[in-house]
């Protein structure tokens, strides 16, 4: 199969994988609906609050894999450009799933999955920053926002980074930040919920 034909196949498949409702399925097993409880966001943090730590961790890993798997598969098939496109397609699928009228999660974990494949040092560095922020402030959104704002800088300083990779990192950072607009409002008001 020609490479361009692979792109036309793998990008939609990656988007479809991103739409997989990890949070709803996992929380549903223990009798919760994250879209109707807590913050209403179908993501790991909200599932952690409404359905417990175990469910939250499972959702986190599941959402991360939605970005990691297509990126890794496409990296092995055709290199970094396809891997980057597939990972972004998965993230957009998570953030704007057609199955939920384009209303999905925040995209942090799925973007992290992409990053562990293409920028493992950046992912590790941001995780090291995120961990003490979580322990100190106990607000997932604050740690996530710091990570995504630093993400394009991390990609930029990596050796052999192409200009389009920095551009895509900037777009990803903007998308995730915009998805946190309600969290940002609550943070400024001192009303953002904590994770104990």
Image: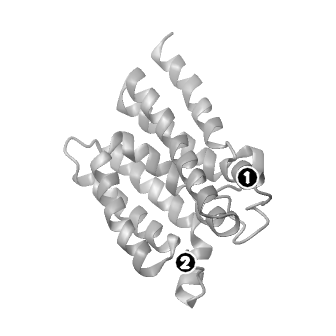
**Which numbered disc flags the more N-terminal residue, 2 or 1?**
1
Q: 120 left or right of 48?
A: left
- Residue 188, percent across and down? 53, 87
Give the image location of residue 140, x and y in percent: 51, 70
Which residue: 78% across, 60% down?
Answer: 33
Q: Secondary structure at mark 2?
A: helix
**Would you place residue 76 above or below residue 184 in this image?**
above
- The image position of residue 138, as x and y in percent, is 49, 77
- Using the image, determine if residue 122 lies above or below residue 68: below
Neighbours of disc 2 within 10 Å: few (<14), some (14-19), many (20+): some
Secondary-structure class at tag 1 = helix
Residue identified by numbered label 1: 24
Outermost left residue? 159
Q: How is the image coloured?
A: one colour
Q: CA distance from mark 2 to mark 1?
A: 24 Å
Q: Can the viewer see residue 101 in this picture?
A: no
Can the viewer see residue 136? Answer: yes
Q: Tell whether 35 sits left or right of 155.
A: right
Q: Within 10 angstroms of label 1, few (less than 14), some, or many (20 or more) residues?
A: some
Left or right position of 127 against 49: left
Q: Residue at x 65, y 64 (%)?
A: 52
Which quadrant of the rendered structure holds the C terminus? bottom right
Residue that extends furthest to the top in the rendered view of this protein: 1
Identify which residue is drawn at 38% across, 39% down: 117
Q: Which residue is mark 2?
A: 184
């Amino acid at each position: 199969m020609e490479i361009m034909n692979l792109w036309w196949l793998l990008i939609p498949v990656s988007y479809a994988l991103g739409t997989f409702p990890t949070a709803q399925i996992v929380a549903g097993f223990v009798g919760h609906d994250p879209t109707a409880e807590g913050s209403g966001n179908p993501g790991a943090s909200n599932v952690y609050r409404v359905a417990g730590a175990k469910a939250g961790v499972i959702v986190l890993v599941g959402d991360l894999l939605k970005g990691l798997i297509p990126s890794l598969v496409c990296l092995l098939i055709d290199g970094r450009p396809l891997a980057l496109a597939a990972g972004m397609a998965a993230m957009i699928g998570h953030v704007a799933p057609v199955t939920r009228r384009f209303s999905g999660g925040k995209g942090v974990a799925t973007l992290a999955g992409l990053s562990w494949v293409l920028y493992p040092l950046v992912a590790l560095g941001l995780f090291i920053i995120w961990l003490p922020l979580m322990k100190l402030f106990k607000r997932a959104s604050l740690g996530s926002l710091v990570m995504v704002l630093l993400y394009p800088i991390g990609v930029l300083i990596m050796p052999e980074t192409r200009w389009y990779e920095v551009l895509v990192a900037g777009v990803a950072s903007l998308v995730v930040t915009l998805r946190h607009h309600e969290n940002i409002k609550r943070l400024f008001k001192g009303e953002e919920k904590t994770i104990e």
